[in-house]
Image (cartoon, coloured by chain):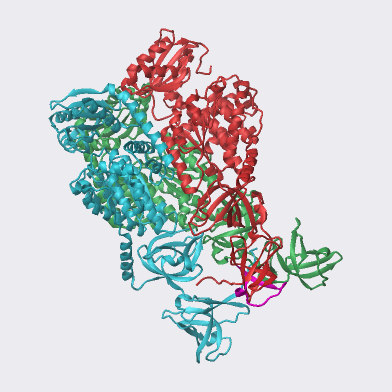
Chain colours: A red, B cyan, C green
Amino acid sequence: MPPSRVSITIVYDLAPNCTMDDVEIGEHYHATVNGVVDYGVFVDLSDNLSGLVHESKLLDEYEYGDSLIVELDEILDNGDLSFSEAQPTEYRTDVVEPGQLITATDLDNNIGDPVHFVGEVIQIRQTSGPTIFQVRDEVGVVPCAGFEEAGVRAYPEYEIGDIVRVSGTVEQHDGGKQLEIDQLEPVPNAEEMRTQISESLDAVAEPNEIEPLVDWPELDTILSDLSDVAKTLRRAVLDGRPIRIRHHADGDGMCASIPLQLALERFIEERYETPEASEYLLRRLPSKAPFYEMEDVTRDLNHSLSDRDRHGQKLPLFLMLDNGSTEEDTPAYRTLAEYDIPIVVVDHHHPDPEAVEPLVTQHVNPYLHGEDYRVTTGMMSTELARMIDPDLTTDLKHVPAVAGLCDRSRADAMDAYLSLASDAGYDESDIEDIGEALDYAAFWLRYDDGNSFVNDVLDVGCDDSDRHAELVSFLADRAERDRNRQLDVTLSHTDHEQLDNGAHLYRIDVERHAHRFTYPAPGKTTGAVHDEMVTKHDGDPVITIGYGPDFAVLRSDGVRLDIPEMVSSLADEYPEAGVSGGGHLVVGSIKFVSGQRQTVFDALVEKMADADIDEQLRSTLL
Amino acid sequence: MPPSRVSITIVYDLAPNCTMDDVEIGEHYHATVNGVVDYGVFVDLSDNLSGLVHESKLLDEYEYGDSLIVELDEILDNGDLSFSEAQPTEYRTDVVEPGQLITATDLDNNIGDPVHFVGEVIQIRQTSGPTIFQVRDEVGVVPCAGFEEAGVRAYPEYEIGDIVRVSGTVEQHDGGKQLEIDQLEPVPNAEEMRTQISESLDAVAEPNEIEPLVDWPELDTILSDLSDVAKTLRRAVLDGRPIRIRHHADGDGMCASIPLQLALERFIEERYETPEASEYLLRRLPSKAPFYEMEDVTRDLNHSLSDRDRHGQKLPLFLMLDNGSTEEDTPAYRTLAEYDIPIVVVDHHHPDPEAVEPLVTQHVNPYLHGEDYRVTTGMMSTELARMIDPDLTTDLKHVPAVAGLCDRSRADAMDAYLSLASDAGYDESDIEDIGEALDYAAFWLRYDDGNSFVNDVLDVGCDDSDRHAELVSFLADRAERDRNRQLDVTLSHTDHEQLDNGAHLYRIDVERHAHRFTYPAPGKTTGAVHDEMVTKHDGDPVITIGYGPDFAVLRSDGVRLDIPEMVSSLADEYPEAGVSGGGHLVVGSIKFVSGQRQTVFDALVEKMADADIDEQLRSTLL
Amino acid sequence: MPPSRVSITIVYDLAPNCTMDDVEIGEHYHATVNGVVDYGVFVDLSDNLSGLVHESKLLDEYEYGDSLIVELDEILDNGDLSFSEAQPTEYRTDVVEPGQLITATDLDNNIGDPVHFVGEVIQIRQTSGPTIFQVRDEVGVVPCAGFEEAGVRAYPEYEIGDIVRVSGTVEQHDGGKQLEIDQLEPVPNAEEMRTQISESLDAVAEPNEIEPLVDWPELDTILSDLSDVAKTLRRAVLDGRPIRIRHHADGDGMCASIPLQLALERFIEERYETPEASEYLLRRLPSKAPFYEMEDVTRDLNHSLSDRDRHGQKLPLFLMLDNGSTEEDTPAYRTLAEYDIPIVVVDHHHPDPEAVEPLVTQHVNPYLHGEDYRVTTGMMSTELARMIDPDLTTDLKHVPAVAGLCDRSRADAMDAYLSLASDAGYDESDIEDIGEALDYAAFWLRYDDGNSFVNDVLDVGCDDSDRHAELVSFLADRAERDRNRQLDVTLSHTDHEQLDNGAHLYRIDVERHAHRFTYPAPGKTTGAVHDEMVTKHDGDPVITIGYGPDFAVLRSDGVRLDIPEMVSSLADEYPEAGVSGGGHLVVGSIKFVSGQRQTVFDALVEKMADADIDEQLRSTLL
């Protein structure tokens, strides 16, 4: 037996300015006779609404000016209304004001009211009940619930990108507000509307104008590129397009991505009512490899398609940070291109613009401005975050310095960045510790984003500065202890020879003479050995090779290796060795098939012996 | 302070044909006196309902025929009703029609009405609020919500499989429909009912009769087996039993599983109201290994038990595709057998029916019909998908050809399949590219199912044929480029010798002389080398061994290796080498402990030199 | 057009004892004039509530004693009320009783009623609608929903740990009960209240007093430590603090964690209304390594922080089982310490109390009581589970025996435990099989907890004893078969020599002469070889080394190896070999860098030849 329900007819009394949007078939209305004809009477419901009650639908006789109650039977295609008379024994009258045309911010003031809302559909999600259309106008996003049948797509004729006019009632839903759709109609002037919304959003998307944190001419030329990226990102948020940040999982990559994540979260929070909007609009994905691997992109694409199919989300925009400028990234980009997924790159690795740029929307890289890797991604990204949310400035003052030390940047601006950090309360050894700690945390987190935890380490969005300090001190200690433990093992197994050009060459088998699967990994282990040797030789040229069965990591101080050039000539000379790799003038890595290691090494060392000595070329911070 | 609530007594006026199902203790009813006795009056509520108002519960005196309002106090075990009189000052009358006995499809027409529904419980899920019983009759599944106390199991005396009579009201819930249970009772003729439902569902489960896509006698003998499988799968859907598809993660396995997944999704959509039903009823799980590994089955079982415990689902049915016919699968099967989990196998690998068949419900394999691996799983599965949903026929015409080329099938029907594909707009090179692309995608997806993405690649359920075409062209190009890159490295490290039987033997160390952890993997790399050598020797017998420290992949053209036989005799002769493996006459792989590689190789090559030459035996498409 | 809504004014008639908690601004009340002044009239709403209707807000003139209807306009800071008169044309009267001060268990009897509730906030979760405050008093936890704006934190001035007074209405929500907050206030006597709640909960947290399962003096001294742990765990549940069980993923670790998980689940179920409370309050996490790895703790911390940030949960308590007593665990502990996360350890591995104890809340280990590893963690944990839920006693009688056999415990109490198991229906071979099966299952589950499945194997919380029996028989058979298969390969590659002290030394390369990546793993493989050799030499001293490129597993019977001592002196003598490891007198493992294996082995064997013979020292069950 159902719970008791009382049924009283409601008769609506329409205000004079009510329109078609305010009536619905099957409902009852107070009407006034405005004309009597042979076949019935014409009645007015409001100044704008009148129609016929056919003789056969009349229960009494009426004259001009009489009042009666009618039920709306039909709305003809030409807009004519037809009614039948009703004489309910028991009824109540409800006065109806015409639905207001509201904007997204008026929702709060219209709970329970009939309203109209015009905007662009940016998401369509089918629930087990209604279909939810996310519709945005110039000022915000309104969830609109359409119901056809449980779990059945309502208004299937509309799709993402359509400009629509929603008539409905503002309701509380799970405590949130949404529009329950009574009517969903196309808008006559859709294109005009779309342009208008787009222009308004363009204005909103406009990044904040900022002064760079330090006075550094090299960065200036890059700032306008960054400003374009800031606008793209802000616009993606406004468009309801998810953003996926793919960043290198090392210190600089963290420094680049964490501030940006925070800035975007805050911007999303400002523009969306739903608190969990950040959770689906923003995700940070660390990459272990220094490029966008096919495995990663296949998985990313798979998740994106699944979010689209299951949650009606747009396909995301991919933002590559400290990663993404090289030819090795292009297969991944081509895969995304099949789905017209936009890609934005902010990187400071040696770029291959010819390969990359046809595939990406924006490409920011210091090399494109005559600068080099010394402008780290973290430095650029800090400014980018400030363009998105300038209120973060105070919290980010130490970040470029951390990024710089992490990547051993010998940029002219390092002093200025360090002094900026110092003003913010972090002296150079703090900054170094933060970098170490971040790198150590990234190592153990592997594919986890480590949100909150890494925020605490970097002290960006961390709410407890004691915890930050203790965490950094602990992690940096551990990192140092593990590095020393590694050096204890490796140093005594380092082979030394002096090359014809005078350089000291050190070789160390980092699989056989180092702890494996632990911190520091082979690349960093090689770096630690190299740093020791450079110190030992006090400025003389030093090269270190850390190798395993099928790879080698190279570091040089004082010798111009030009690793990309070496890789390319080795690949040509020994096609059967499968040589690949990359890097800078003095830092890089090479891969080959393990059976050809000796061949590759012999050739490599020969090239090294021929390389130019250049005291200025340094991979170490002296 | 609570929101304002008005309380008016509702007095029910029962229609003459109302029964016990329509009353509830504590509610008020209009009654008519049908008898006066010393100790009170007997009243009628309907033709079927009458009872006593005891003198002590009467507020006035009444005579035969008088009307009064009563409250139902008690329903005695013998069905007698006892009432007390009530004289509410303010009340409304609600007319009650008797609850209708409805079927699952009548839900829509009875919203807000009291109804009765009889069926079998197929899922019981405890929510934080009510307990949800999924009850099915012959035509559909109805969610019924029982409420005892928040999060407390209602009607704990009922379990999955019980036949029940639900009395309740049809309500909108989150927009969907469900029955709010007032009463849940056993059904007297339960077994009869169960049989009836089961028979009806058997009829519904009956697969569609189809004409095979091509006229191919070899397949005909298998079709009736497939029809049985189709029925099992359709029945599982009707029974609310989840289906888990475990398939080989290569081209043929994809061709086998993707169409079937689509067909089952469409069948589920047709039979279930809940749009997310597919999400829990169907899951596709790629297997990297060519058999069902203990690690996989342990995880699958764990998830199945957790779905049972947390979501009240039945344990699933496992469908093995392009996988599952061999002795190596039986440990996994035995583990599932402990939980009576049904297993269905559709495979074309050389089967071990004696080991497998005692453990599985159905086993379809061309070898069981005197055919062989040339009838690929994708070919069989395409027909199976059509038996489940014949409307898919047009979308699947190219699939068997893709499956065939992927597995290098030299079946007689390949020409017919290729011409069928050609009629559907895919010429042979398209088909080859799709196969390559699928295989390439499968490699990078690893354990991800890659839904949507692989649909786009295979062009099954893909809504954008341009995207399909571009995606395939891109992925096939990448696959070819990576294969060529691998050949550049491997070919120059291939050792050659000519065996006593005249065959050319090539050996290549695919760990030391090939790129690792990238596409193509060792097996495919060996295949690529072999193809090159076969072409070079232009029809002469060629064997290729691609090996690593503890495995070897074997390929032969023109030599009858009979790999299963070789493996078994090596295992006997060298027990300390731990030899295992399997395959066909000309394709297979061997595992051994790395310390015995030389021993195994010497013995293997000796056997190869003794093997028969048979020009007809080919592993390559010439 | 909105659905028809009827609007009638509700006028509240307050009972004489109503207070400020029962009125709300904007609502209408029946009032009585109790004083007339120049500028208006004073009215009474109840004995405790009166205020002014200013002359300008009066619609009529009134005298002392007159009745009128007023609307509450304002509550001044000093508690004065001000009203305006209202004369609604149509209204109903609702009598209001004052809100009752209820406890958590009174919720059921007050649905729809205004109530007050005082307690401590233990969780604050922001939903897309209201903010949910979980508030607990001495007897239970009540969800309280506060609404500010959709998705906006209500009452942001309150945080976890605050003592609050909630005034609101008890509502059904999704079938569950919650308090809809009208008012959230600080409590004047908060500290008193907190102490009172804490003391009550302390009493509830008090563990059950139990008699140990067997009479075993060695355990007695440990029981009081365990009782403290039981209290900590029960209190964590009452405090809404999640518990994460990190346990060694082997037989003893399973025997330790499964009963405890069940006991805690039952305790949570008893104290929480929400059925899914266990899902977020309790998680069991198997560790492959014999210590808490940095990778694991980083991930655990990351998840904990995310649960805190996204679901407003407290940071968890970590319970280490069969794991956690050694120095190797301390880096992980230090990481947790940064977040003040409490850690409790119950372990029987050789402990390093000086390193561990400063970092953990409780540390139970038999070595701290003059006992040793023979008191297994499973034995201790079974008693611990009984202290939490003594009703489990019958179900756990066989568990200590399983734990004992798994770890080859030669404890004096083994006989008593075996006879206890025998009384419960498990003879010694059953127990051995369960242990084998558990170990085999743990191997394949890897990082999955395998809930349900492992319960069935161990027969703790398993509802089908046939399934248990068949599962164990199947898994134990497989384990034995796989072990034999491994021995077939390994035994013939075992190198033998006799040391100067007479011990037989066997060496086996478990990477080159054993199946890899399958059961049994290297450690267990070495154990199996060793057992064979001990049997062969019939009591003579035997040492077995199973090694790979960078590790060795050691087992001894009859020779006092003292592995921790050996590791430490090897590390000192050969710093470049990176030696680490640990273990007991006769069981242990060593890691080193692969390039130094020969050096390490030579030194190791020399030490072994010098080691003392002691026939009592056994790693095998004879």
Which region shows up in magenta? Answer: A54-72
A497 and C240: which is toward the camera? A497
Residue under the image location 39 percent in, 35 percent down: B473
Q: Is residue C15 above or below residue A576?
A: below
A277 and B465: which is toward the camera? B465
Give the image location of residue A304, x and y in percent. 47, 42
B256 and C141: which is toward the camera? B256
In the drawing, does residue B413 fall left or right of residue C277? left
In the drawing, does residue C36 fall left or right of residue A278? right
In the drawing, does residue C322 fall left or right of residue A159? left
Tell me, yes or no, whether the highlighted magenta stretch contains residue A57. Answer: yes
How many dots with numbers?
0
Image quadrant holding the C terminus of chain B, namely top left
Give the image location of residue B86, x and y in percent. 57, 81
C586 and A578: which is toward the camera? A578
Q: Residue furthest front?
A: A38
Tell me, yes or no, whether the highlighted magenta stretch contains residue C596. Answer: no
Give the image location of residue C150, x and y in percent. 61, 52
Q: Is residue B177 above or below residue A269?
A: below
Image quadrant where residue B58 sits:
bottom right
Q: In this view of the protein, can residue B182 be seen by the observer? A: no
Give the image location of residue C448, x and y in percent. 38, 44
Image quadrant where residue C551 sits:
top left
Image quadrant holding the N terminus of chain B, namely bottom right
Residue under the image location 24 percent in, 50 percent down: B364
Q: In this view of the protein, can residue C119 be seen by the observer? A: yes
